[in-house]
Image (cartoon, coloured by chain):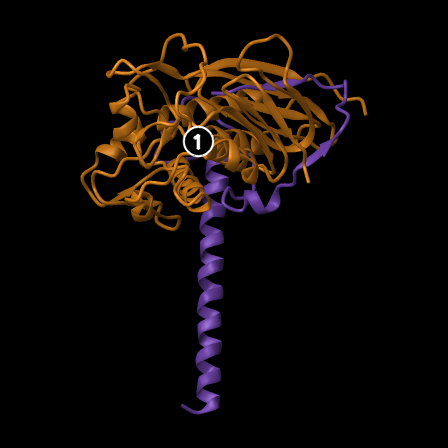
Amino acid sequence: VTTAEETRLEFPCFGGRVTVLASDGAPVEKARERLEQWHRALTRFDPASELCLLNANPSESVRVSAIMACFVAAAIDAAVRTDGLVDPTLVDEIERAGYTADLGEPLALEPAAAPRPARPSPVRRWLDVGVDPLTRTVTRPPGVKLDSGGVAKGLFADMAGKILAGAGSYAVDCCGDVRIGGRDGVFRAVLVDDPFERGAPLHEFAIAAGGVATSGIGRRSWIGPDGLRAHHLLDPSTGRPAHTGVVQATAPAPPAADAEVRAKAALLSGREGAREWLAHGGVLVFDDGSQLVVEQP
Amino acid sequence: MSPARAQRIHLIRRRAVAGAVAVFIAAWGVIGVQLASGNDPALTTPTGTSTTTTSTTSSDQQQTQLTTSDQPSQAVAPVTTSQS
């Protein structure tokens, strides 16, 4: 199948780089506008963002924008499907760990001293969060804060993909969470990056429609207030960065939002439990540099 | 309770549940259209917009297929998935 030449846009967003590719004059600029608009609404690093205003709101019920309603629904869904392993309510914990602004250069990956799988928090604050799509109202006990870091980029990739659905082919890469589609059904190569930067991609998927996401502890990492290595994927049971022995997980799934949840849950589950989240296949990278390609059943 | 009454109660319950599900789907559909068109009244819209209809976000996972192959096409550029 030959396709028309694709328009390519790259721009900074979500604390990283976003790439939008689409053929047939699809509205890539419109997709960019929406992505930037959604980023402004859901960033945790702007006190004037809708997310920060929601988190600071002392009311139990808060009327929100459509994108916020969708995000909260996706966040609740992620927590339910993982039984709290992917927990969107760990804002205070991530800030205590030192992630309060965009980060600088990441730390080099090292083997975990005592790897262990992450566990859900016994508090299960996410059970108290709800969203009513009719009234676009979010309800939660005041003080329960939501973090967009866990599920938003996959959701945004899916939604930007809807804008480009008329194209023969398109791809939306939101900092590693990718949505692919198009009328022509062209199989696009999706290369899995090596977190140890050894030169070649670790694996190649060929996807005509669907999503793929990668989660890892290498890029958003820093030295915490306690002087220890820290990163942005927390063990909900401790509120501390999870060191599970898995440093990167890549998961394909029908929508990118689902892929992102699967990738995160796989990483948090550790060496033994990761595979169960890769129902559509995937790639795991361990802290000793080894890797495992999980074939699609 | 008579069987007829029990049957009627069962019927009413089923209709109520079906109605609630329909309202839920319709509400997410409206939100999906708003987001695709950029007509989100709670957000400031930076510039002029055009409209595109779209399916609902909440039903996305049911509607979307994952279509994979062993061989990628050379006709489109590859993308890289890396940790974020």
Q: Residue furthest bottom?
A: B2
For chain B, what colour was chosen? purple
Report the front residue among A87 and A140.
A87
Q: If the image is split into quadrants, where does the C terminus of chain A sit?
A: top right
Left or right of A227? Residue A117 is right
Q: Quadrant of residue A218?
A: top left
Which residue is the extreme one toward the front? A114
Residue name at image x 76 percent, y 19 percent: B75
Horizontal side of A16 relative to A202 (left or right) equals left
Colour assigned to chain A in the rendering is: orange
Query: Which residue is more in the foreground, A289 or A7?
Result: A289
Q: Residue at x 41, y 31 (%)?
A: A116
Judging by the rendered image, the residue that carries numbered circle 1 is A152
Residue at position x 41%, y 45% from top? A83
Q: Amino acid at mark 1?
A: Ala
Give left or right: position of A252 versus A115: right
In-front residue for pair A137/A108? A108
Farthest residue toward the left?
A: A58
Up the image or down, A216 lies above or below A155; here it is: above
- Determine which quarter of the picture holds residue A236: top left
